[in-house]
Amino acid sequence: MAQIIDGKAIAEKIKADLAQEIFTNFLRPSLAVLLIGNDPASKLYVSLKKKACQQVGINFHEYLLPENITAEKVLECINFLNNDETVDAILVQLPLPSHLDTNTIIQAIDPKKDVDGFHPENIKKILAGKNTFVPGLALGILKLIEASNVDLNNKSAVIVAKSDVFFQPLTKILADKNIKAKLIAPKDPNLAAISKRADILIVAVGHAFLIKEDMVKKDAIVIDVGTNKVGDAVVGDVDYSGVFEKVGHITPVPGGVGPMTVAMLLYNTVEFHKKYRK
């Protein structure tokens, strides 16, 4: 039977430590978030980030932009924030409306304020081992894996994801921990054969219950990044109840990766503040 990796509890501890650090050292970290359009999920995520910032003492600046805004106007807003010395970190909430090119928008952010770590310059530095900054998603996943208290040396990891861009930094971070990581697309015909050999299985697809019991290794660590709505329920990419008796450790959805990603966003905002402004 699996042990549940409680991301919410771990995240609360991280937030409490950040709040103490900010208060004790009189820090004034600041995060700016751009929300373009009216996507309900994006609105929810931004509201959770806003609440978390308020809890720990990070100044939160919310820029709500209309669905039909031009790319030029978005770039103007980002340029303004790049040059605002009181803003330590910038985040553009994804996904963007279809008429906006995500790469163009992300590349406009100053790499020193790119708190998500999606800027190509930051990804290049991470892969080359030249950047101490770790993107929040990757850092959150690593901390969840480490919370299992399993000896990770020489373990194998499989990351199932539709896009490898966001997960390249994670493969490097895992490699630094002597974990051999492999990226695989969810439509790969060999998905089941590959996933069930993984000591650590990380799934980020957006497909409810994609991973079944016969696709996981006994006693594996399973990190479920997926968030899907099925009726009134929020579920992950992994058939949680189906794999629970087989795997060793698993993150729940909700309450696993989500809270950790937000906590790591706050952590990186504070780190940017200390490194570049204070």
Image (cartoon, helix red, strand yellow):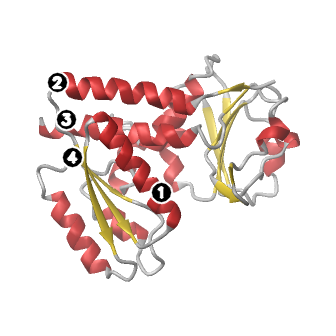
- Mark 4 and mark 3 in contact (Cβ < 8 Å)? no
Which label sits in the foreground, 3 or 4?
A: 4
Which quadrant would the N terminus be assigned to in this image?
top right
Q: CA distance from mark 2 to mark 1?
A: 31 Å
Q: Secondary structure at mark 2?
A: loop
Residue underneath mark 4: 88
Residue at horizontal 62%, vertical 38%?
181
Question: In this orientation, does residue 43 appear?
Answer: yes
Give amino acid for label 1.
Answer: Leu
Horizontal relation, residue 270 to residue 42: left or right: left
Q: Image height check: is 185 above or below 80?
A: above
> Mark 2 or mark 3: which comes first in sequence?
2
Residue underneath mark 3: 275
Horizontal relation, residue 186 to residue 35: left or right: right
Q: CA distance from mark 2 to mark 3?
A: 14 Å
Q: Secondary structure at mark 1?
A: helix
Residue underneath mark 2: 25
Question: In this orientation, does residue 130 appear?
Answer: no
